[in-house]
Amino acid sequence: MSIDKDTVKHIAKLARISLDEKKINSLSKDLTSIIEFIEQLNKLNTKKIVPLTSITNASLQSREDKVSDGKIRDQILKNSPEKNEEFFVVPKVIE
Amino acid sequence: MVNISNFTLTKLIEGIKKKNFTSQEVTQSFISSSEKSKKLNTYITKCFEKAISAAKNFDKKKNYKGLLAGIPLAVKDLFCTKNVKTTAGSKILHNFVPTYESTVTNKLWSEGAFLLGKLNCDEFAMGSSNETSFFGNVTNPFGDKLVPGGSSGGSASALAADLTPATIGTDTGGSIRQPASFTGTVGLKPTYGRCSRWGIVAFASSLDQAGPMTKNVQDCALLLQAMSGYDPKDSTSINTKVDNYISKLTDKVKGLKIGIPKEYRVEDMPNEIDNLWKEGIDYLKDAGAVIKNISLPHTKYALPAYYIVAPAEASSNLARYDGVKYGHRSKGNNLFEMYENTRSEGFGDEVKRRILIGTYVLSSGYYDAYYLKAQKVRRLIKNDFDKAFDDVDAILTPSTPNAAFKIGDKKDDPVSMYLNDIFTVPVNLAGLPAISVPAGYDKKNLPLGLQFIGKAFDEQTILNLSLAIEKRANFKRKINVWWN
Amino acid sequence: MTEKKFDYYIKGKKEKWEVIIGLEIHAQILSKSKLFSSSSTQFGAEPNTQVSLVDSAFPGMLPVINQFCIEQSVKTALGLNAKINLNSVFDRKNYFYADLPQGYQISQYKNPIVGEGEVILDMPYGSKKIGIERLHLEQDAGKSIHDMSPDNTFVDLNRSGVALMEIVSKPDLRSPEEVNAYIKKLRSIMRYLGTCDGNMEEGSLRADVNVSVRKVGEKKFGTRCEIKNVNSIRFMQMAIEHEARRQVELLENNKQIDQETRLYDTKKNTTRSMRSKEDAHDYRYFPDPDLLPLSLKKSLIDRLKRELPELPDKKKERFIKEHNLSTYEANILVSEKEISDYYEEVIKGCDKKLASNWITGDLFALLNKKNISISKSPVSARNLSALIKMITSGKISGKIAKDVFEKMQDNNKDPQQIVDKENLIQQSDPKELEKIISGVLSKNQNKVTQYKSGKTKLFGYFVGEIMNVSKGKANPQLVNEILKTKLK
């Protein structure tokens, strides 16, 4: 299965990564060879196998419904590249 | 003055307790050797002033209670350290300063240790040679122009060059064990769920584990003890008791059954690797262990399965790096443009490749063929190990298919780089503990390691077996200091 | 009550069209903290003050599930007679948006916590079952504020991570009225259970509607369109009608309907396409590797079953059977938990039928006039109960009671005190009444004669006079009896 340029463009869009023509070409090559590598798995018949979604047999632990976090706005906003006192600030979304 | 920077962790702790030297002297010694070793490029952030201050404080208070009392430690720059820049080797986090401390490093500091600095690594832990870091590649102390392995390359290099008494790394597909093998040091990946992932920059959540990287097996047991334990803030952390790895450490391994999986004898395997493996078998026989041939039939499918699962999880884990809340932000006329430019500028090539592969294998129409398939193969691989462990107590394999290679050798061929992890990756897929212990040299006098794979939560057995090998192999790190 | 027939159809050029509606409801769970983090969920806090490191997706942060939210989903499932899946999985729904800090939402895709269930609606044309497809847990997103700045969007993550139950109905609804009834019923059930307060204005209950049309008699479903985030039932009804008509017009002109998401414009009363087709989301669902599968113990389900409060349908049955109320009355009394709570408090001390009459009559009239809900009633249940008790015991007449009720509205005054203070106790002493009645009759001799010779309407005149003289306090039944006797 080869990953052509249009496919590269499509997944780059899904992943929100911009690419120039040169990059698209080299990625098409790289991704194709990676996909060909992972397609070795097609040699295995796995019809009756249950997928492994978690390594351990443990089940999900839960916590009590208590408020013990938040009220740390300064910390939350501290690292933001653009902010005001109350909000994160980003360029406008086009709807 | 004796060069205490080549002492083991254990010896340093004892020495401080016995007042043979102070924490300040120890710390200064590592700072000096680190300052002289810039060519290795192991540090991203140095915390030398703070470290001296902490050492002075320790010497004043003299609280010897902790397991790591008075010890300075540099750690992989994937662990979030409070108020100390944490970059994950990436441009997109080049200016990120966490306001919080990871659970694992917090445990180390509560045991009396303090931060010496943050060590270089492959960007977002993606790589096997420490060539993908935004902060430049790391060099192996064993030779100019040699890679130290990856992704914990900075950690392994600093450790081997005596710039830190011990260190911690993370291992997703071999990122502790492979660099340990390349640098003649000990590296252990614990059972999945043994150590907390809270506060560690995530790469592939179902595979990542933090682990100790040390000069010898005894140090490894000590550091593992300090790092391990249940964390309710990590839903994948497992609530089982932490053994006393140090007190139970022994090289008495008589009667233990060791499996030798035939599928690990790969085509074109260099003779030296095969010979080393045989030597390992002999050492174990000498120690009274019983050798059994076993089969792990799905071994060869582990690497392709890994290169579906890990990138898939990474593509989702790295979606949060969007320039909104922290890190690098590029300009954009609107939100989506800002995202695309930020992530394009902020991520390196290997990270981009993996995000794109990960996005692809999860995308509509491909999920069943790739991701679901890989999870099924993962089940088969785990079943192989479970079955084998009905018969044996541990499994012995080489750690890597070759010794350290030249910087730049594999840069243009991603798949060839991936093949470095062929022996280490199955372990992460199965969530088992594994350790690389240095056992010999290749023709070029480069170190090689042997790997033990253990049953879940049986780190003790593989530590003990490693000790048995260590005592018999009598491996010495023969490094000529060329870098200062 | 008239037996109506279902009659909502879109009249096309040639034939009648049926409207097929499915609803996806997002209900915020009434938990103190969020689904996967311990920040508060309170409405109306200062921006970004109810946000933790986990909520804002800092590197290395991990989710830990809130036990209470799990239990609320199970309780809701029990209220919907739905299948509870003992094993379920959390999946990541991946997409990029400013108010989604992780770049994915933790939701449930193929293995939700709750499976099929049902809701029963009481329509004028009879009972109707609406199927529930599934219920699952997921995180709410934060808020993007677009109108505070011309070039920028401001992001508030307070809501990010709040627990939602997404309840998906089967496409069984057929009219805007049914949609209204469905939402109200669902809301009522959740309020009874205390799992969600169903407040559409505050956003704790939101709905996306799926609309398609088909010719009456057709079995196949048509192409559907989704209308997102309409935030009131009224607008939803208008949007559905508009959308159904739009689709009928397209189909009758032999045009195709594109399966898409549309936004409802409240000012123009139209729907418009939300995004261009090429931007269709590919959510790349996969099981969240930071969470293990959720495994529910049967003992938990059993405990929650035992602790379940009486639900509206059962309560209604009980009111009809045991309290002898009509279906109509019972429906009203169970329509809101606050109303049935109020009613059940009132009847602790007085007659059930009278209580029902007073609540659905006088009290509701008062509440409607003041445009307030029963929870803000100026007259408490206890006091209303006391008032009704005084009528039953004959202490005051029904008419006087209405006056007292008015006076009680001022600060929830005690009816007993009002009656005593203003001397409103009903006059029920036959001797006293005899005096009054004799007095009135003797003053109106000619009218008595007229009455006895056939003008029976004058009876009311005498009663009126007696009431006047007694200042309304004369016991009406006794007056009737004694007057009748005297006029023989």
Image: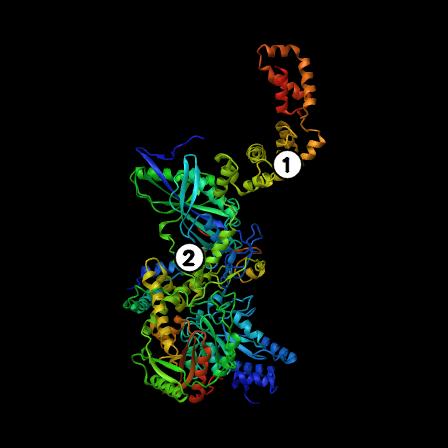
Residue A66 can be seen in this image: yes
| Subunit bearing disc 1 | C
Q: How many neighbours does mark 1 have within 10 angstroms: few (below 14), some (14-19), or many (20 or more)? A: some
Circle nearer the N terminus (2, 1):
2
- Asked if B30 appears above or below B237 in the picture, the reply is below
Q: Quadrant of residue C431?
A: top right
Q: Identify the residue at horizontal 64%, vertical 10% (top origin).
A: C446
- Asked if A18 appears above or below B138 in the picture, the reply is above
Amino acid tagged 2: Lys
Residue C142 can be seen in this image: no
SS label for mark 1: helix
On the image, the x and y values in percent for residue C323 come to 53, 37
Amino acid tagged 1: Ala
Q: Nearer the viewer, residue C50 or B84?
A: C50
Same subunit, tags 2 and 1: yes
Q: Quadrant of residue B439?
A: bottom left
Instruction: Name the residue that disc number 1 marks.
Output: C386
Q: Nearer the viewer, residue B216 or B356?
A: B216
Position of C38 with respect to C275 (left or right) is right
Q: Nearer the viewer, residue C258 or C464?
A: C464
C-alpha distance separating marks 2 and 1: 57 Å
Instruction: Name the residue that disc number 2 marks.
Output: C93
Say if mark 2 contacts mark 1, CB within 8 Å: no
Q: Nearer the viewer, residue B364 or B289?
A: B289
Q: Quadrant of residue C89?
A: bottom left
On the image, the x and y values in percent for residue B84 come to 55, 70
